[in-house]
Amino acid sequence: MDHTVRRGADTEPPRETDRQAIHPADGEAAATFARLAVELHEADGVDETVEAVVQFALQALNCTYAGVALHTRGSRPEIAAVTDQVVADVYNLQIDAQAGPLVESLRDRTIVLIRDTTSDNRWPDWAVKVAGLGVRSVLDVPLAVGANGQSVGVLGLYSPDPDAFGADDEAIAHILARHASVALATARREQTMTRAVDARKLVGQAMGILMERYDLDGDRAFAILRRYSQDTNTKLRDVAQQLIDTRKLPGTAEPRTERRTRP
């Protein structure tokens, strides 16, 4: 099954000589993550936030590819950003089978390290396929917020080299994940609030159309929109948008209501 994937910038993975890997005990680490925090805070929405996270991972960690998969209310994680198609392939193999380090990290909110996909036996079928894609080392780090560790998603790090991730990489990935978790939770909350405000505006406009055309009060106009939403199994904002765009409600040319008689 194909899944929609948001690709990273169409650039080659950074060469080893281009990397500026961070050491957790390095005095520059705090300043580097402070700059990252500012970048994430200034990112415009979820897409830019996850893109900043994966690009930072490429520069700061011993990985060749990176990706972010987000928790959703449904059973399938959302592939939010990848730096290469190989990451999308690695994710999709797990999402389709509902098994693998991504699924475990997302479910249990724990770091999962695979030192070598050619010898790891926890998910043998998946490991064989991933090794065939040229990925030998995997480090999945959960993104979670709140006292109860509410799941946001997973940051995945990948390398074609076996045993590529050491203790320093895990420490840095953990710090990056904490910053990313807060930024992503904030971005998604703001996105939800924006959509809610937009939906209220659409419903208000649609109610205005019904009130003017059929001489209804606000309560009756809203009741009509809600009834058509329920009858057609269509979101209320979509019913409102269709009425605004076409001046018709779903599945009918005119709403089932009687015009009030003016006194």
Image (tube, rainbow, N blue to C red):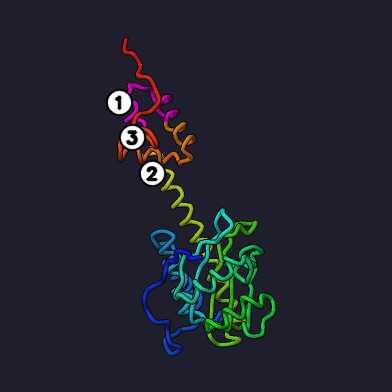
Disc 1 + disc 3, Cβ < 8 Å:
no
Amino acid type for the residue under numbered disc 2: Asp
Amino acid type for the residue under numbered disc 3: Lys
Of the numbered discs 1 and 3, the one sitting upstream in the chain is 1
Foreground label between 1 and 3: 3
Q: Residue 98: x and y, percent?
A: 62, 65
Does residue 156 appear to the left or right of 147 in the view shown? left
Does residue 184 appear to the left or right of 203 in the view shown? right
Residue at (42%, 32%) from the top-left corner?
225
Vertical placement of 90 versus 2: above or below?
A: below
The answer to whether one can see residue 125 in this image is yes
- Where disc 3 sits, the SS reads loop
Quadrant assignment, res 136: bottom right
Residue at (41%, 58%) from the top-left corner?
45
- Where disc 2 sits, the SS reads helix
For the magenta stretch, what is the residue range?
A: 206-224
Q: Residues within 10 Å of mark 3 (few under 14, many from 20)?
A: some
The answer to whether one can see residue 169 in this image is no
Write down the residue under mark 3.
248
- Per the rendering, the mark at residue 198 is 2
Quadrant assignment, res 19: bottom left
Of the numbered discs 3 and 2, the one sitting upstream in the chain is 2
